[in-house]
Image: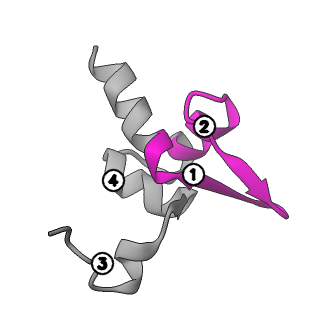
Amino acid sequence: MSEQPTNEKDLRRTYKVEELAPILGIGRNSAYELVRSGQIRSFRVGRAYRVPKDAVEEFLRKTSD
């Protein structure tokens, strides 16, 4: 039996860059640099960047090798 998401955060499939920084243990400016440089896959919605959850996992796998 699969687990069901229990709250709104579990249902989200993307992060804002500001949310990404503490996940990676880096500062906000460093997180924006990773996104702008393409080191972490992202897309834009208007002027804001969004980072898919799987892009974060992909980045962590790639950097841990």
Between circles 1 and 4, the one closer to the viewer is 1
Secondary structure at badge 4 equals helix
Is 12 situated left or right of 41 in this image? Answer: left
Which residue is drawn at the image coordinates 45% and 54% (left, top)?
A: 20
x and y percentages locating residue 23 in the rendered image: 33, 53
Which residue is pictured at 26% across the width and 77% down the height? 4
Distance between the alpha carbons at the discs numbered 2 and 4: 15 Å
SS state under label 1 = strand
Which residue position is annotated with label 3?
5
User: Could you tell which of marks 2 and 1 lies nearer the N-terminus?
Assistant: 2
For badge 4, the amino acid type reads: Ile
N-term-proximal mark, 2 vs 4: 4
- Separation of residues labelled 3 and 4 (CA atoms): 19 Å
Q: CA distance from mark 1 to mark 3?
A: 20 Å
Residue placed under numbered mark 4 in the picture: 23
Q: Earlier in the sequence, mark 1 or mark 3?
A: 3
Q: Which tag is nearer the camera, tag 2 or tag 4?
A: 2
Select label 1 or label 3 by which is in front: 3
Pointers 1 and 4 in contact (C-beta within 8 Å) = no
Seen in the picture, residue 60 relative to 52 is either above or below; the reply is above
Q: Amino acid at mark 1?
A: Val
User: Distance between the Cα atoms at labels 3 and 2?
Assistant: 24 Å
User: Do the CB atoms of the residues marked 2 and 1 lie less than 8 Å apart?
Assistant: yes
Horizontal side, residue 60 vs residue 50: left or right: left
The verdict on residue 53 being magenta is yes
Quarter of the image holding residue 42? top right
In the picture of the structure, the residue carrying the numbered disc 2 is: 41
